[in-house]
């Protein structure tokens, strides 16, 4: 199973870039992994929220293939405990999902078209985090899920 992580816009904070780099190096030990940044929409501050989501949505949809199993990281999505997320990853692998694509949208979420294309929405917490911070949190949870699947001592439960 190949895993791709799409993010809208560069990660701005150096501490987040540093933290993300740690997990970007670890995850490929478990599965082929690609992190891809979709460029920010130009002059986004001059565009209303709904129009911005539509433009971002077009940019996201251009990056997807029909074979991608798409999971949106969204506050209204399904929540998992870490151990349950690991089990879900294993199920996708056994079910033959070849291309698993996780997406973090912009600050205002996703367009209607992106929601319609998605196979699933997943929430990392009932709390709200910045879309920049969610990047690091998700990568850590993805790494944690693989370490759980392999029975490694990273996760304590």
Image (spheres, helix red, strand yellow):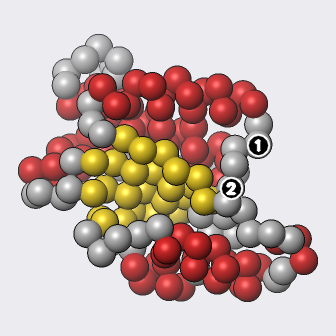
Q: How many marks?
A: 2
Q: Secondary structure at mark 2?
A: loop
Residue 63: x, y in percent? 47, 67
Quadrant in the picture for residue 83: top left
Residue 89: x, y in percent? 24, 47
Residue 74: x, y in percent? 52, 63
- Near-viewer residue (81 or 122): 122
Q: Are marks 1 and 2 in contact (CB under 8 Å)?
A: yes
Q: Residue furthest top?
A: 153
Residue 21: x, y in percent? 56, 28
Does residue 59 sit above or below 80 in this rendering? below
Taking the image as shown, residue 34 lies to the left or right of residue 29, namely right
Taking the image as shown, residue 97 lies to the left or right of residue 17, namely left
Residue pictured at 41% horizontal, 69% vertical: 64
Quadrant in the picture for residue 92: bottom left
Residue 126 seen: no
Residue pictured at 73% horizontal, 85% vertical: 51
Does residue 9 sit above or below 139 in this rendering? below
Mark 1–mark 2 Cα distance, whole angstroms, equals: 9 Å
Specify few, some or many for label 2: CA neighbours under 10 Å numbering under 14, 14-19, or 20 or more. Answer: some
The circle on residue 133 is none
Residue 130 seen: yes
Does residue 5 sit above or below 60 in this rendering? above
Residue pictured at 27% horizontal, 37% vertical: 31
Quadrant in the picture for residue 32: top left
Instruction: Tell me the residue that label 1 is attached to.
Output: 12
Pick the quarter of the image with the C terminus: top left
Residue pictured at 42% horizontal, 37% vertical: 141
Specify few, some or many for label 1: CA neighbours under 10 Å numbering under 14, 14-19, or 20 or more. Answer: few
Instruction: Tell me the residue that label 2 is attached to.
Output: 9
Q: Secondary structure at mark 1?
A: loop
């Amino acid at each position: 199973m190949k895993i791709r992580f799409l993010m809208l816009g560069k990660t701005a904070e150096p501490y987040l870039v540093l933290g993300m780099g740690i997990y970007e190096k670890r995850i490929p030990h478990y599965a082929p992994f690609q992190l891809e940044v979709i460029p920010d929409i130009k002059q986004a501050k001059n565009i209303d929220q709904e129009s911005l989501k539509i433009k971002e949505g077009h940019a996201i949809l251009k990056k997807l293939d029909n074979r991608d199993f798409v999971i949106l990281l969204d506050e209204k999505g399904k929540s998992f405990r870490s151990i349950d997320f690991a089990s879900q990853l294993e199920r996708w692998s056994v079910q033959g999902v070849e291309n698993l694509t996780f997406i973090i949208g912009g600050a205002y979420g996703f367009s209607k078209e992106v929601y319609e294309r998605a196979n699933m929405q997943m929430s990392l917490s009932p709390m709200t985090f910045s879309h920049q911070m969610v990047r690091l949190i998700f990568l850590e949870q993805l790494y944690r899920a693989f370490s759980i699947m392999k029975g490694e001592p990273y996760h304590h439960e």
